[in-house]
Image: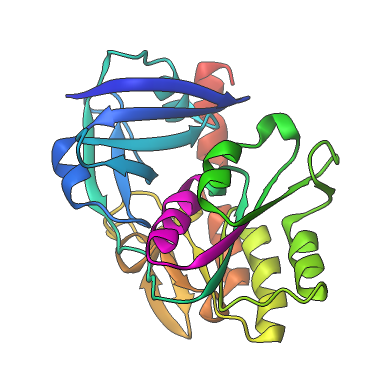
């Protein structure tokens, strides 16, 4: 059993948990994830490690309440336990020493982006961050990014925070202002990552993306996270979740993401969400 040390509501339907998990905290790296089973015999869901504290023996997860299991998870309180957490799983993010990096996080994608930018800053890179969401109320980790990023920019669909529009609009503004980056890291909805890659590819700015949105069982055995990377078949949960964005077949990926929508809708009805 894994004890919940802290729980915090970040915004509407987005929550953060700090969980006691000594063995995972000891070995995990930015980019990796855990498989969480809230109750014994229940569904296992993949959640990216948003942060870790080796001295505290804890890992941090951030999740959005969108289905049956995340609803069950949200019902857990500080001091209670979670049945099972397996990890760290997946490959660590491919971080190399560079001078300037732009991190782009859309929605809950800001959570897995955070440990990568934090690590790159520790490696001596100068990092800027673009954080986007539908509204200011739904934006997460603003203060945390301010502590590690040299510059931070915001975009909201309704214009309530930063630029009205999308993170790609901010990206284009920065480039037009003469900003130069050695690498871009984009994490968020598939359509957002696709749009970022389409633009950075034109400028030949190396761009990594995280394909965690399509992961299911975390082992590669179910085949649900099968993706085409540079005309080769890969599995997001064992070969990734981070990949070279220029090589990702986003059209195939977006079709695959809709495979389980009927089942997801059925389970949401069971909890009245």
Find residue 21 and report its image quarter: top left
Give the answer, above or below, for where 103 lies relative to 57.
below
Q: Position of residue 52 (x, y in %)?
A: 31, 42
Find residue 245 and report its image quarter: bottom right
Residue in view at x 22 percent, y 47 percent = 87
Q: Position of residue 115 (x, y in %)?
A: 42, 51
In terms of depth relative to the viewer, which is nearer, 260 or 185? 185
Residue in view at x 39 percent, y 63 percent = 236
Give the answer, above or below, for where 208 lies relative to 205.
above
User: Within the magenta stretch, is there residue 264?
Assistant: no
In terms of depth relative to the viewer, which is nearer, 146 or 215? 146
Give the answer, above or below, for where 147 lies relative to 13.
below
Q: Position of residue 151 (x, y in %)?
A: 65, 56
Residue in view at x 63 percent, y 24 percent = 12
Start-end of magenta stretch:
111-129
Going by the image, does 44 lie left or right of 127?
left
| Color style of the picture | rainbow
- Quadrant into which the C terminus falls: top right
In terms of depth relative to the viewer, which is nearer, 204 or 152? 152
Q: Count every numbered label the image shows and give the total.
A: 0
Q: Position of residue 223 (x, y in %)?
A: 36, 61
Q: Main secondary structure of the magenta part?
A: helix
- Quadrant into which the N terminus falls: top left
Going by the image, does 212 lie left or right of 151?
left
User: Within the magenta stretch, is there residue 128?
Assistant: yes
Going by the image, does 89 lie left or right of 206?
left
């Amino acid at each position: 059993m894994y004890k919940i040390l802290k729980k915090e509501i970040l915004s509407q339907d987005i929550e953060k948990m700090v969980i006691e998990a000594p063995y995972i905290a000891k070995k995990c790296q930015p980019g990796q994830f855990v498989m969480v089973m809230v109750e014994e015999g229940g569904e296992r869901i993949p959640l990216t490690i948003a942060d870790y504290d080796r001295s505290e023996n804890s890992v941090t997860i951030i999740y959005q309440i969108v289905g049956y299991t995340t609803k069950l998870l949200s019902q857990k309180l500080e001091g209670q336990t979670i049945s099972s957490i397996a990890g760290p799983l997946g490959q660590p993010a491919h971080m190399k020493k560079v001078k300037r990096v732009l991190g782009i996080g859309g929605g809950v994608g800001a959570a897995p982006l955070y440990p990568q930018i934090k690590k790159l800053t520790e490696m001596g890179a100068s990092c800027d961050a673009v954080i986007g969401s539908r509204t200011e109320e739904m934006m997460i980790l603003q203060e945390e990014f301010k502590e590690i990023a040299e510059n931070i920019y915001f975009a909201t669909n309704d214009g309530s925070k930063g630029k009205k529009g999308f993170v790609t609009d901010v990206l284009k503004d920065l480039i037009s202002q003469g900003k130069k980056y050695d690498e871009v890291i984009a994490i968020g909805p598939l359509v957002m990552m696709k749009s970022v890659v389409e633009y950075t590819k034109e400028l030949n700015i190396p761009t990594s993306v995280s394909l965690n949105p399509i992961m299911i069982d975390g082992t590669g055995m179910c085949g649900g996270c099968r993706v085409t990377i540079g005309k080769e078949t890969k599995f997001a949960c064992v070969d990734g979740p981070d990949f070279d964005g220029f090589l990702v077949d986003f059209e195939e990926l977006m079709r695959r993401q809709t495979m389980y929508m009927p089942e997801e809708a059925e389970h949401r009805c069971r909890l009245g969400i």
